[in-house]
Amino acid sequence: MTRDGVQSDGQAMSFEYEAESGRWTWSHGLRELHDLAPDEVPTTDLILDRMVDEDRPVMLARFRHHLDHAGPYSCVYSLRRRDGQIRRVIFVGESEAVDGDVKRLTGFVVDLTEPIRETARAAVAASAEHRATIEQAKGALMLTFGVEEDGAFELLRAYSSRHNIKLAEVAHRIVAGLCDPAFSREEPVRSLLDIVIALEPGEGASHLPVLPA
């Protein structure tokens, strides 16, 4: 927790949506971001209500699209908290289908409101021996989720901030996960999502191996 009761910027928050029941499951951090009371149930209407007016119709159209089309997705939008504070977030995940029908959406949200990109870039520059691994992890995020380089970089920074560990170590863990048979999946998106969730403490995660430096 940080100022205004919001998780520190750059922290990843996971979610799951069951298409048939319309039921959302949010991690604790995602509930905090949206000002949910302990007994309040997350809903699609609540998410849309929190969005700024200009983003709402676009995001609703994209949500409906992903309920009809399986595959990875990512999008950036702004939400307004009850105290009037505007937060800029990136929404990344996968739409999963069974026999052609989408059954669920899974993924995570990262708060990008106050990026510290220059600090993170300096960390990369200071870790020249790890640069190849960082670029590999960033490339995996770009290809899997269809985000631009800066978006992938922000995601790596988010994990670094989340766990209070160096950016290079986060990259090593992601790359190690991609090489670990335990995370082998038919769908690359599912594999990377599982690796990301494994970095989330308290989410039923296992410890990821670390590649040699």
Image (spheres, rainbow, N blue to C red):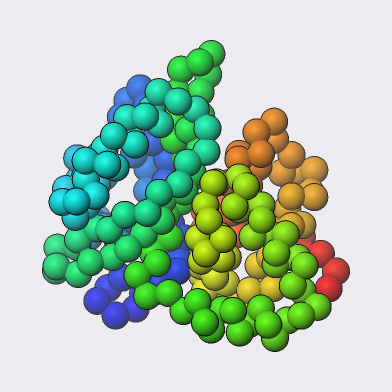
Instruction: Give the quadrant of the C terminus.
Output: bottom right
Residue lying at 33% horizontally and 35% vertically, measured from the top left: 63
Relative depth, front residue between 44 and 79:
79
Residue 33: % across, % down: 30, 61
Q: Is residue 37 above or below residue 103?
A: below
Q: Is residue 22 visible?
A: yes
Relative depth, front residue between 82 and 68:
68
Residue 69: % across, % down: 45, 25
Q: Is residue 37 visible?
A: no
Residue 87: % across, % down: 28, 65
Q: Is residue 94 above or below residue 116?
A: above
View extreme (right): residue: 212
Direction from residue 5 to residue 169 in the image, left or right: right
Q: How many marks?
A: 0
View extreme (top): residue: 99
Relative depth, front residue between 25 and 157:
157
Q: Is residue 20 above or below residue 107?
A: above
Instruction: Give the quadrant of the N terminus.
Output: bottom left
Residue lying at 35% horizontally and 22% vertically, measured from the top left: 20
Q: In terms of image quadrants, where is residue 86?
A: bottom left
Q: In terms of image quadrants, where is residue 157?
A: bottom right
Direction from residue 13 to residue 126 in the image, left or right: right
Residue 173: % across, % down: 71, 62
Residue lying at 32% horizontally and 30% vertically, measured from the top left: 64
Direction from residue 32 to residue 105 in the image, left or right: right
Direction from residue 174 to residue 75 in the image, left or right: left
